[in-house]
Image (cartoon, rainbow, N blue to C red):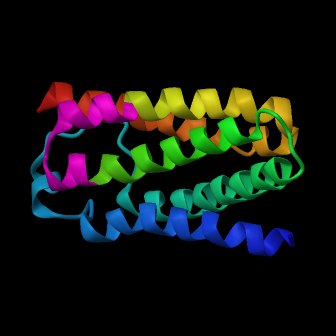
Amino acid sequence: MPFLLLLAPFLLAVIAAAASGVIFPAAGPWYQSLNAPSFQPPNWLFGPVWTVLYLMIAVCGARLAVQAGQGAGLAGFALGLWALQITLNALWTPTFFGAHALGAALVIIGALWLSIAALMATALQIDRLAGWLLAPYLGWVSFAAVLNWAFWRLN
């Protein structure tokens, strides 16, 4: 199957996850009323960063799907981890910005971090590029987890 056809469902999945940011925007009055940590980046930065990360996440998934189609043993497991991380990714925004549940969002982002780390470790065994495509994502989610923790502590 051509790579672009395999990429399409992964792009749709990341678009669905990103849509929660449109439904529950960070620029809302509740978020603006929170005590923010001094290291909070400007709001305009999140869109470009997530756009690049979501593209990398989708390409990773498609590369793993290619390997699964070729019978790579761990590829099916890796695709399960991919599905888990994108689900947790999609849940974080409505929990934090929609439900205003900073503690629950912290639990979700912790689980998200673990799922990304497990996916990266597994993907590196199957397709090194697919695994390394997740490194910036893991780094950004690490920062986001610290930011989430700081918001929870300050509010």
Residue 88, picture quadrant: top left
Magenta: main secondary structure? helix
Residue 137: in sight, yes or no? no
* Extent of the magenta region: 94-109
Q: Position of residue 81 (x, y in %)?
A: 58, 38
Of residues 84 and 76, the one drawn nearer to the viewer in this rendering? 76
Q: Where, quadrant-wise, is the N terminus in this rendering?
A: bottom right
Asked whether residue 120 is drawn in magenta, I would say no
112 vs 36, left or right, is right
Q: Above or below — where is 53 with respect to 78?
A: below
Q: Nearer the viewer, residue 19 or 10?
A: 10
* Coordinates of residue 101 in the picture (x, y in percent): 15, 40
Any part of residue 13 in sight: yes
Count of number-bearing discs: 0
81 displayed left or right of 20 = right
Q: Residue at x 56, y 64 (%)?
A: 51
Relative image position of residue 139 (x, y in whole percent): 58, 35
The quadrant of the image that shows the C terminus is top left
> Which residue is drawn at the image coordinates 24% and 63% (left, top)?
24
Position of 16 with respect to 58 (left or right) is: left
Which residue lies at the image location 53% right of the left edge and 63% below the top edge? 13
Examine the image and state in which quarter residue 127 appears: top right
Q: Residue at x 58, y 59 (%)?
A: 54
Would residue 103 be counted in the magenta stretch? yes
Q: Residue 83 appears at what percent x and percent y?
A: 54, 48
Q: 124 left or right of 139?
A: right
